[in-house]
Image (spheres, rainbow, N blue to C red):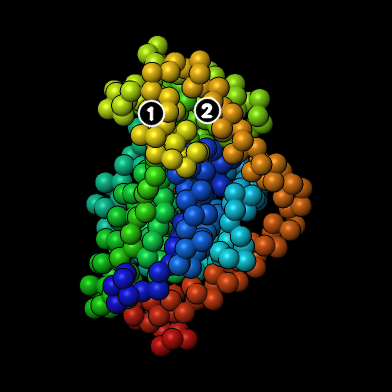
Amino acid sequence: MTAATHTPRVFSGIKPSGGLTLGNYLGAIKRFVDMQGQDYETIYCVVDLHAITVWQDPAELKHATREVAAGFIASGIDPSKSILFNQASVPQHAELGWIFNCVARVGWMNRMTQFKDKAGKNAEKVSLGLYAYPSLMAADILLYHATHVPVGEDQKQHVELTRDIASKFNKDFKAEDFFPMCEPIIEGPATRVMNLRDGSKKMSKSGESDMERINMTDNAETIAKKFKKAKTDPEPLPESLDGLSERPEARNLVNIYAALSETSSEAVIAEFGGEGWGKFKPALADLAVEKLAPISTEMKRLMDDPAEIDRLLLKGSDRAKEIAEPILQKTYDIVGMIGPAA
Ligand code: TYM
């Protein structure tokens, strides 16, 4: 079977390593919601095992796991339409991750740009988990024989590595197309939302200053203030998209506007070309508040009842296990382990 003949199935995940940002929302969650309504089975995961590849305070990790789950639901992921769960509740992820640690090559891991960025000069001191992380990510996806993986631009290399792992496994064990060749789905105007203070850096959960990102829990006043103070240049918006090529901060704000309003960056330029920041920034802030305030309000409401979130996650993990367990057992059998499937 190739990906085309495997059941169309979407898998994606978000790390609870802090609060959700506008980058997570536009680059991932909003697109997860769009895919939920199409002809796919959709599986979304709060990847807590990935989060601990760097230090997480245990109490904060629990809070962040629930908050990411609340963010999914508040944005429109319906736990009765999608399978929503946290990774640690489905131990098959770690089990398949181990098998893939024995399939993936050290040379492949050495080429992962995200590891290089995160480890920096400190590569000897980071956890072994951070290094092996892409192999666990491959397990997340392949444990469900997922065919489509919606992600932001920064995860592309990891999804490509997942294909390499699937292909080496299939070849080494003569398993034909047991693991499908999943496709990264990187679409829309906001596949890489940039830092509001420095257009050369990605907006991330862990950047130093809170002013560089929009958090999904920010209130209307904070969102307006952050966009008002966002770094730009003195020029008005150009009349065509080409005029943004050397203006990363301006391009970022136009892309954010396009993604929030569900149009294209071309359409935003057609509307605002020639206008100054005095007009564009307040319009962007109003739009962001209009779209994000209902989500943050709903997140707060959900977070008032953590036991209910835990219950929903547990239910999701039971459904996830039903798909994962037979695939894991078949994998063990292919590899030569004695077990229920032997
Ligand atoms: P994470 O938690 O860093 O990010 C979650 C998702 O949000 C996207 N994203 C962005 N998109 C646009 N602009 C940004 N500034 C931005 N920041 C983050 C990411 O691309 C991602 O889609 N390794 C993954 C989690 C993961 C996963 C998986 C994803 C684990 N297993 C299996 C897909 C399939 C990660 O760290 O994402």
Q: Residue at x 62, y 66 (%)?
A: 80
Q: Looking at the picture, tell me which residue is in the foreground, 71 or 332.
A: 71
Q: Looking at the picture, tell me which residue is in the foreground, 46 or 192.
A: 192
Residue 151 image position (x, y, % from top left): 41, 50
What secondary structure is marked by label 2?
A: helix
Query: What residue is pinned by disc 2?
Result: 284
Residue 276 image position (x, y, % from top left): 44, 15
Q: Looking at the picture, tell me which residue is in the foreground, 302 or 171.
A: 302
Query: What residue is pinned by disc 1?
Result: 269
Q: Is residue 113 left or right of residue 36?
A: left
Residue 115 visible in image: no
Q: Residue at x 47, y 63 (%)?
A: 38
Q: Residues within 10 Å of mark 1 (few under 14, many from 20)?
A: many
Q: Amino acid at mark 2?
A: Leu
Q: Looking at the picture, tell me which residue is in the foreground, 166 or 151.
A: 151
Q: Which quadrant holds the N terminus?
A: bottom left
Instruction: Tell me: is circle 2 under 8 Å from ligand 1.
Output: no
Residue 304 image position (x, y, % from top left): 77, 48
Furthest-top residue in view?
234
The image shows residue 74, relative to residue 218, as above or below, that is: below
To which quarter of the image does residue 287 belong? top right
Q: Earlier in the sequence, mark 1 or mark 2?
A: 1
What secondary structure is marked by label 1?
A: helix
The image shows residue 122, relative to residue 43, as above or below, that is: above
Q: Which quadrant holds the C terminus?
A: bottom left
The image shows residue 63, relative to residue 176, as above or below, that is: above
Q: Is residue 114 left or right of residue 32?
A: left
To which quarter of the image does residue 199 belong? top left
Give the Cα distance between marks 1 and 2: 13 Å
